């Protein structure tokens, strides 16, 4: 049977060759049959393609089964299985098949268990790494938040709001190491015998004396351009009243103008700085201490926030 199948396979392979040669003969030597020769040649090419395919589909499997049976194996698959163990002897295979398969099953089971253990270890290590990553991320976020909070805190400490830290200059216009606190945009009204509720611009100049005590000076610009002045020989006296809107706290102090600013000394300056340090609205009233033709000045600081920062920087530099 096996020999017959082999003969049939050889015939399947030779048939297209014989047919092709026949067509070539007709095409070359039979002038009246050239077209037929071309058809035969074409048919031989078709057979070259399809006969091996038909052989593989219908004859290869029976031949393989027959070969396996002839070698003493139960089937072609049985023969393939034995070869997977490296065994060609069918008798040895039959007598040891169950044992070998069981050994393979046990080995595969051990490999599976080892793989599952390794997988579990990898998953555990992955979980540990993920947990460590989450911890690191949490720590990073905490550090970032702490850093931002510290930056905000320092920024808040450095924020002086409407108050400006500046340096005095010498005769050459160069900055000295002595500093003072100024301000932005304080407007008010003033009245005297010639006008009522005219525009006023107010500028604070707060510095430190030789003992690091505050010294407050206030410059008043009538109509926003005309500085209130006095002489050194005949200084003018002024009374300043301040009131915290939130609490009603009142302050009354005296100052002297012997140039172009009203100067408050000693305890008066400390009290003015104190009332500005509450971060709320403070109203001011300044009146000239004369018997007649008094000038009065009204203004307010809507929000004295950050004066404490400015005063701290003035005293400590930080």
Image (cartoon, helix red, strand yellow):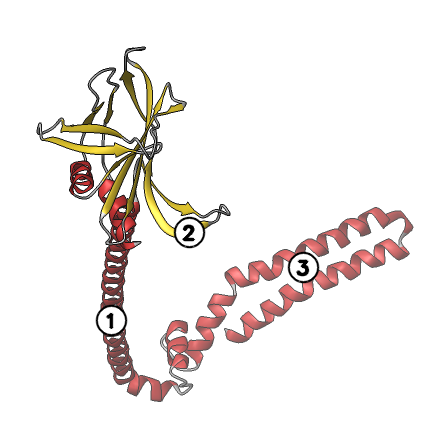
The nearer-to-camera label among 3 and 2 is 2
Residue linked to disc 3: 48
The answer to whether the residue labelled 1 contacts the one labelled 3, judged by CB atoms less than 8 Å apart, is no
Q: Tell me the number on the disc at residue 176.
A: 2
Q: Is residue 138 above or below residue 239?
A: below
Q: Which residue is mark 1?
A: 116
| Sequence order check, earlier mark of 1 and 3 | 3
Kindly check if marks 1 and 2 are in contact, taking CB atoms under 8 A apart as contact.
Answer: no
For image coordinates 68% across by 62% down, the residue present is 15
Which residue shows up at 65% across the image and 65% down it?
Answer: 13
Q: Residue at x 22, y 63 (%)?
A: 131
- Residue sitting at the far front: 233
The answer for how far apart the CA atoms under marks 1 and 3 are is 51 Å
First of labels 3, 2 by sequence position: 3
Q: Is residue 229 shown above or below 207? A: above
Q: Specify which label sits upstream in the sequence, 1 or 2.
A: 1
Could you tell me how many numbered marks the image carries?
Answer: 3
Distance from label 1 to label 2 (Cα)?
Answer: 78 Å
Q: Position of residue 246 (x, y in %)?
A: 11, 28
Rendering coords of residue 310 (x, y %): 28, 44
Percent position of residue 269, x then y: 20, 40
Query: Does residue 90 sit above or below 292 in this rendering?
Result: below
Pointer 3 local density, CA inside 10 Å: few below 14, some 14–19, many at least 20: some
At x 47% / y 67%, what residue is drawn?
A: 62
Seen in the image, is 125 located left or right of residue 164? left
SS of the residue under disc 1: helix
């Amino acid at each position: 049977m096996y020999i017959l199948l082999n003969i049939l396979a050889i015939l399947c392979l030779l048939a297209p060759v014989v047919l092709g040669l026949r067509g070539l003969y007709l095409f070359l030597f039979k002038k009246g049959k050239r077209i037929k020769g071309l058809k035969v040649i074409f048919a031989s090419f078709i057979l070259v393609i399809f006969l091996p395919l038909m052989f593989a589909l219908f004859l290869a499997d029976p031949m393989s089964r027959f070969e396996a049976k002839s070698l003493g194996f139960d089937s072609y698959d049985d023969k393939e299985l034995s070869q997977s163990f490296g065994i060609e002897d069918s008798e040895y295979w039959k007598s040891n098949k169950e044992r070998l398969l069981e050994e393979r099953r046990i080995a595969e089971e051990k490999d599976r268990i080892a793989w599952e253990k390794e997988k579990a270890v990898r998953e555990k290590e992955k979980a540990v790494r993920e947990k460590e990553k989450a911890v690191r991320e949490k720590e990073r976020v905490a550090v970032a938040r702490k850093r931002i909070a510290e930056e905000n805190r320092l920024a808040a400490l450095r924020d002086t709001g409407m108050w400006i830290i500046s340096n005095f200059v010498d005769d050459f216009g160069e900055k000295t190491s002595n500093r003072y606190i100024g301000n932005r945009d304080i407007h008010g009204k003033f009245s005297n015998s010639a006008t009522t509720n005219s525009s006023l611009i107010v500028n604070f100049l707060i510095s430190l004396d030789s003992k690091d005590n505050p010294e407050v000076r206030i410059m008043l610009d009538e109509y926003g351009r005309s500085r209130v002045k006095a002489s050194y020989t005949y200084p003018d006296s002024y009374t300043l009243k301040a009131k915290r809107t939130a609490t009603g706290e009142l302050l009354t102090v005296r100052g002297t103008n012997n140039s172009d600013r009203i100067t408050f000394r000693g305890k008066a300056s400390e009290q003015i700085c104190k009332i500005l340090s509450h971060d709320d609205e403070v109203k001011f009233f300044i009146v000239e201490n004369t018997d007649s033709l008094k000038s009065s000045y009204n203004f307010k600081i809507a929000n004295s926030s950050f004066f404490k920062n400015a005063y701290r920087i003035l005293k400590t530099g930080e």
